[in-house]
Image (spheres, grey):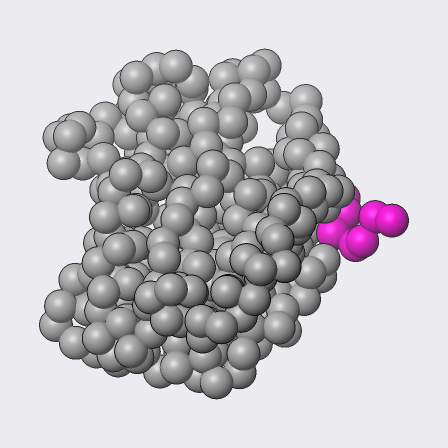
Amino acid sequence: MCRKLVLLLVVIPMLLSGGCSKHGAKQVRQAPLGSPQNPIKMALVPSLDTRKLIVSGERLAELLKKHTGLTFEVTVPTSYAAVVSAMGAGKVDVGWLSPLPYVIAHDQYGVRVVLRTIRDNSDRYWSFIIARTDTGINKLEDLKGKRFAYGDPVSTSGCLYARELIRSKGYDPDKFFSQVIYAGAHDKVVMAVYNKQVDGGAIYGGVVSDAREKVADTIKDVMQKTKVIAKSAPIPNDTVSVRKGFPEALTSKLVDGLMKVAKSDEGRVAIMTLYGIDGFVKAKDADYDTVRKVAKAENIKIEQIK
């Protein structure tokens, strides 16, 4: 299922490229990209609660404007695939893409990574498999034949690396569970496990924190009632990426602006609230070759399908 949905991603037709009159097109060209009349379109992947991401993203946009003079418009599309497709169609300029969506976006549409995020002084994270503490499930093998929740089908930690972990233990991830659901966001996976809708789930995990902390303010005992029972191979942290053809001068301003935001007091709060980010380092495409290797091992086709 995970593989099929990724395949769907790469063949999504770009039907939204037309529809503007010549007069309207001239009006857009007259307004410089990054101006209030033609803001830079910045999309966040819906890995957490959409409403909270919008609030945090808009705060970040305000800080970026302060440091760069550029205007940003923030959106949270309905899925990871929607962000990739929008960048490919030129509808989104800047995407906060996790590793697998980035690899697909780069290989399909020429999207370019410019920054990699830092959390807890680390530029890598993992897929954590969690279960409730009162179920007797203590290791991955105990989930065989049970109900399981992945995140988004194109989520690196919420799907791809969880499947790779299962396969590395000698099991077929397509046959390992009795029932699989795709909860979407990581916090929804946590809630599905906590509420006993499933027996286990895949979430992102860092050096000292994981997705469970995103619901700890409303589910006070989530850390006591759930536990990590397995951990994947390391994953390079998520990206800030730009679409093909995004002006180099604006890319430089974006990178410098985010670096300055991360060093300011209010900026540190903003990026921590957004995705639990401590800071950024400059990145290149080769940093994500390990993700390509796992995608290939999982038989996920990321090459262009004509």
Q: Dominant secondary structure of the magenta stretch? A: loop
Q: Residue at x 66, y 34 (%)?
A: 5
Q: In this rendered view, identify the residue nearer to me: 167 or 122.
A: 122
Q: Residue at x 46, y 42 (%)?
A: 77
76 horizontally vs 2: left or right: left
Q: Is residue 254 above or below residue 161?
A: below
Name the side, left or right, on which 26 lies relative to 187: right
Q: Is residue 302 magenta?
A: yes
- Residue furthest to the right: 306
Q: Quadrant of residue 81?
A: top right
| Residue 66 in sight | yes
> Which stretch did the figure color magenta?
297-306
Is residue 180 located in the magenta-colored stretch of the structure? no
Residue 27, image x, y percentages: 50, 65
The residue at 59%/14% (across/down) is 178
Left or right: 121 as drawn, with respect to 294: left
How many numbered callouts?
A: 0
Q: Position of residue 278 (x, y in %)?
A: 27, 67
Q: Position of residue 37 (x, y in %)?
A: 38, 64
The quarter of the picture where residue 42 lies is: bottom left
